[in-house]
Amino acid sequence: MLYSAYQGKNILITGHTGFKGSWLTLWLTELGANVIGYSLDPPTSPSLFEVLNLKERVTH
């Protein structure tokens, strides 16, 4: 049910490089969504955003 709800949808996430935003980004891309992110640089080094290599999965 969730897969069909997000498959192919464009979703904007603000704060996608933070901890919660990174998990949401990962979850939505796994469901087939096209994620567009807007945020500051990752707050820590290494950040979850970098560890999960989300830069390759998101338009930002």
Image (tube, rainbow, N blue to C red):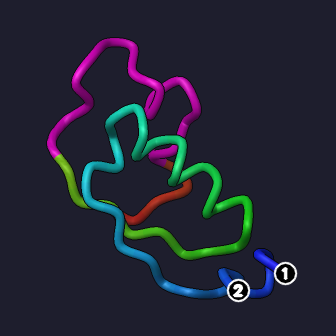
**Mark 1 and mark 2 residues within 8 Å of each other at the beta carbon:** yes
Q: Which mark is residue 5?
A: 2
- Hey, what amino acid is under mark 2? Ala
Q: Residue at x 23, y 59 (%)?
A: 38
Q: Mark 1: which amino acid?
A: Met
On the picture, is 6 further left or further right than 37? Answer: right
**In what quadrant of the picture does the N terminus appear?**
bottom right
As drawn, the residue found furthest toward the front would be: 1
Q: Position of residue 59 (x, y in %)?
A: 39, 65
Please provide percent x and percent y for residue 23: 54, 42
Residue ranking furthest to the right? 1
Q: Is residue 51 above or below residue 7?
A: above
Task: Indicate the position of residue 39 as horizontal and vertical percent values.
Answer: 20, 50
Q: For mark 1, give the secondary structure.
A: loop
Report whether 48 appears left or right of 45: right
Magenta-highlighted residues:
40-55
Q: Does the magenta-highlighted stretch encompass residue 19? A: no
Q: Which mark is residue 56?
A: none
Between the C-alphas of marks 1 and 2, the distance is 6 Å
Q: Position of residue 46 (x, y in %)?
A: 39, 14
Which residue is found at the position 35% from the left and 49% from the top?
A: 16
What residue is pinned by disc 1? 1
Tell me the quarter of the picture where residue 50 sits. Answer: top left
Compare residues 1 and 56 and report the one nearer the observer. 1
